[in-house]
Amino acid sequence: MDGLNSNLNLNGDAAPSVIPGLGEWSPAGVPSTRAKKRMRWIVPLLLVVVATVVTLFGWWVWTVLQGG
């Protein structure tokens, strides 16, 4: 049955010479699985650190404005 599965070929009928970054077996420049796993840890950790810094800076500004 056609239509039950999606077509994963996003390039369609385009010639390989006009598709940018297409390697021999797959697209070139795609991050590896190891890099993706690393980013799954780094991004949330970075967000928590940034939120903590912003909160502490806001607390410091609040105390300075309160005259403390």
Image: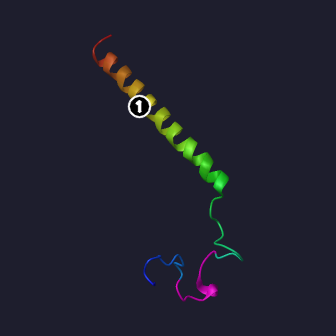
Judging depth in this view, the residue of 2 and 33 nearest the camera is: 2
Is 15 above or below relative to 42? Answer: below
Would you say the magenta stretch is mainly helix, strand or loop?
Answer: loop
Report which quarter residue 20 is drawn in: bottom right
At label 1, the amino acid type is Val
**Number of marks in the rendered image:** 1
Q: Can you say which quadrant of the picture contains the C terminus?
A: top left
Q: Residue at x 27, y 15 (%)?
A: 66
Q: Which residue is mark 1?
A: 54
Pointer 1: residues within 10 angstroms few (<14), some, or many (20+)?
Answer: few
Judging depth in this view, the residue of 19 and 4 nearest the camera is: 4
Residue 16 x %, y %: 63, 85
Q: Residue at x 41, y 24 (%)?
A: 56
Residue 19 x %, y %: 59, 81
Is 10 above or below relative to 40? Answer: below
Q: Residue at x 57, y 42 (%)?
A: 42
Looking at the picture, the colour scheme in use is rainbow
- Magenta segment includes 44: no
Judging depth in this view, the residue of 39 and 54 nearest the camera is: 39
Q: Residue furthest right?
A: 24
Q: Can you say which quadrant of the picture contains the N terminus?
A: bottom left
Q: Please give the range of residues in magenta.
A: 12-21
Q: Residue furthest front?
A: 1
Judging depth in this view, the residue of 2 and 53 nearest the camera is: 2
Residue 61 x %, y %: 35, 22
Is 63 on the left or on the right of 43, as rendered?
A: left
Q: Residue at x 29, y 12 (%)?
A: 67
Residue 3 x %, y %: 43, 81
Q: Residue furthest top?
A: 68
Q: Secondary structure at mark 1?
A: helix
Is 55 above or below relative to 3? Answer: above
